[in-house]
């Protein structure tokens, strides 16, 4: 058993934790890994996060925080590649990780892998290093397929059987699983036959130093009434405009089309605007589909796609908005809602992830049974009919998510790690 200071090898093979948020393969998981690694380092543990080189300009080592760093390894071409293609480069990824470890005389107490691709790499390493392996899946292929089949989202876009079978195998081979919600724990047991005793539930966190309530008027002025100078959208803006905010990947699974279809029910609200943050080059086809949808409903002037925003700018967007909407069909947790509430902005969301535990029904927002447009519109209208959020009410909303600080989440993860280590028996060589 190691000392109280843990040495953790964290794996994020396909997605870089410092990549552009809101693009196809960079979202809440990247935020989770980066923030958790930083907080674990702050608490005195040593964390190395391994990812593949995504760009020839990537430095091999980035310091994330005291005791925490990000390490790029070659695995295939030094560029963005399709997510599933990373599978075929995992042997190179694992080999280069092992070489880096040996060259730098590194030792780790445990492996913490994120997503099924990284977890597959982690299985090889757990056998080589004789250390326990903890997995956090973030999304489950079997659940995504069930939802896409039920709602007929994108024919032909189902998760491959390779992923389903690999996840089922990983559940058996790893030593422990961290699930962000009780719902995911139940799905792991139902779809993959996971042992209940092998799974702990630890929610995701939010950076309360970064995400905090800002003055709405000042936030709107900073953004040029909802966008920074280099991303201005057309039309005159007034400070009393009602702004609905969407933040996330532009993906059918996120239900943004349902939110657009909700806007015609809100025509009676003066100055109503939907501001969409997220995108990237892989999202252009879906964005064009959504633009056409807005045109079909003759509400195109009220919908603005701003593309990607820098992570440090998000608190301004949340604070400038009157309501943030999460109309997803599926979320592993629901990080956007947590960020919005930390900024004092109420949320309307479908019953996905952990949102029933995050949003206080009728007080800090509403959780709906589905993303039917009329239901979204009804609750959005209720929130917009309230007096504009002032400093006091924003503080009250923010206070409801204080328990999700990264310091609390990191402490819970370390307790899990220590328990796994205490129960781990090194196999006889």
Image (cartoon, rainbow, N blue to C red):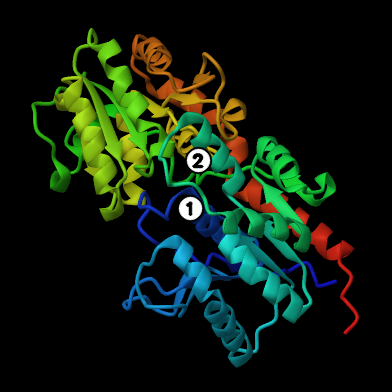
Residue 357, position as x, y percentages in the image:
62, 28
Write the residue at 54% across / 61% down. Answer: 38
Q: Which residue is outermost to the front?
A: 156
Residue at the disc numbered 2:
335
Q: Which residue is outermost to the bottom?
A: 103
| Sequence-first tag of 2 and 1 | 1
Question: Which secondary structure lies at badge 1?
Answer: helix
Question: Which secondary structure lies at badge 2?
Answer: helix
Residue 215, position as x, y percentages in the image:
32, 30
Write the residue at 30% across / 21% down. Answer: 261
Residue 67, position as x, y percentages in the image:
58, 71
286 vs 307, nearest the viewer: 286
**Above or below: residue 182 compared with residue 419:** above
Q: Residues within 10 Å of mark 1 (few under 14, many from 20)?
A: many
Location of the N terminus by quadrant is bottom right
**Above or below: residue 209 compared with residue 162:** above
**Above or below: residue 297 compared with residue 188:** above
Residue 339, position as x, y percentages in the image:
46, 38
In the shown orientation, is residue 290 left or right of residue 46? left
301 vs 106, nearest the viewer: 301
Mark 2 to mark 1: distance in Å? 9 Å
Residue at the disc numbered 1:
31
- The answer to whether any part of residue 302 appears in the image is no
Q: Quadrant of residue 103?
A: bottom right
Q: Quadrant of residue 101?
A: bottom right
- The answer to whether any part of residue 374 appears in the image is yes
Write the residue at 73% across / 40% down. Answer: 190
Location of the C terminus by quadrant is bottom right
Residue 119 disc label? none
Marks 1 and 2: in contact by CB < 8 Å? yes
**Above or below: residue 424 compared with residue 277:** below
């Amino acid at each position: 058993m190691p000392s109280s200071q843990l040495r953790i090898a964290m794996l994020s093979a396909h997605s870089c934790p410092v990549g552009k948020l809101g693009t196809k393969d960079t979202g809440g998981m990247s935020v989770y890994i980066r923030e958790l690694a930083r907080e674990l380092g702050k608490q005195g543990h040593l964390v190395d996060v391994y990812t593949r080189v995504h760009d020839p300009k990537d430095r091999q080592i980035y310091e994330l925080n005291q005791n925490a760093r990000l390490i790029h390894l070659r695995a295939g071409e030094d560029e963005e590649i399709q997510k599933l293609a990373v599978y075929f480069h995992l042997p190179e990824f694992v080999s280069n990780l092992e070489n880096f470890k040996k060259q730098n005389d590194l030792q780790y107490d445990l492996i913490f892998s994120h997503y099924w691709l990284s977890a597959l790499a982690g299985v090889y390493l757990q056998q080589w290093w004789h250390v326990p392996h903890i997995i956090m899946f973030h999304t489950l292929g079997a659940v995504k397929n069930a939802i896409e089949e039920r709602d007929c989202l994108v024919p032909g876009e189902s998760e491959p059987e390779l992923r389903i079978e690999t996840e089922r195998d990983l559940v058996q081979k790893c030593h422990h699983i961290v699930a962000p919600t009780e719902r995911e724990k139940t799905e792991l047991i139902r779809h993959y036959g996971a042992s209940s005793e092998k799974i702990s539930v630890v929610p995701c966190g939010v950076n309360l130093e970064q995400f905090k309530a800002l003055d709405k008027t000042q936030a709107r002025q900073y953004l040029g009434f909802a966008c920074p100078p280099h991303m201005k959208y057309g039309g005159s803006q007034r400070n009393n405009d009602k702004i609905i905010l969407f933040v996330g990947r532009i993906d059918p699974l996120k239900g943004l089309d349902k939110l657009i279809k909700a806007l015609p029910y809100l025509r009676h609200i003066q100055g109503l605007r939907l501001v969409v943050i997220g995108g990237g080059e892989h999202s252009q086809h879906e964005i064009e589909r959504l633009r056409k949808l807005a045109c079909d409903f003759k509400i195109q002037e009220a919908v603005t796609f701003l593309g990607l925003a820098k992570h440090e700018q998000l608190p301004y967007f949340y604070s400038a908005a009157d309501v943030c909407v999460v109309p997803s069909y599926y979320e592993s947790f629901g990080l956007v809602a947590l960020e919005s509430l930390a900024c004092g902005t109420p949320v309307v969301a479908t019953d996905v992830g952990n949102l029933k535990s995050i949003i206080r029904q009728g007080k800090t927002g509403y959780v709906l049974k589905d993303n039917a447009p009329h239901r979204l519109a009804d609750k959005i209208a209720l929130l917009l009919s309230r007096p504009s959020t002032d400093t006091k009410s924003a503080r009250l909303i923010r206070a409801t998510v204080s328990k999700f600080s990264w310091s609390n989440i990191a402490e819970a993860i370390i307790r899990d790690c220590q328990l796994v280590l205490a129960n781990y028996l090194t196999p006889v060589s």
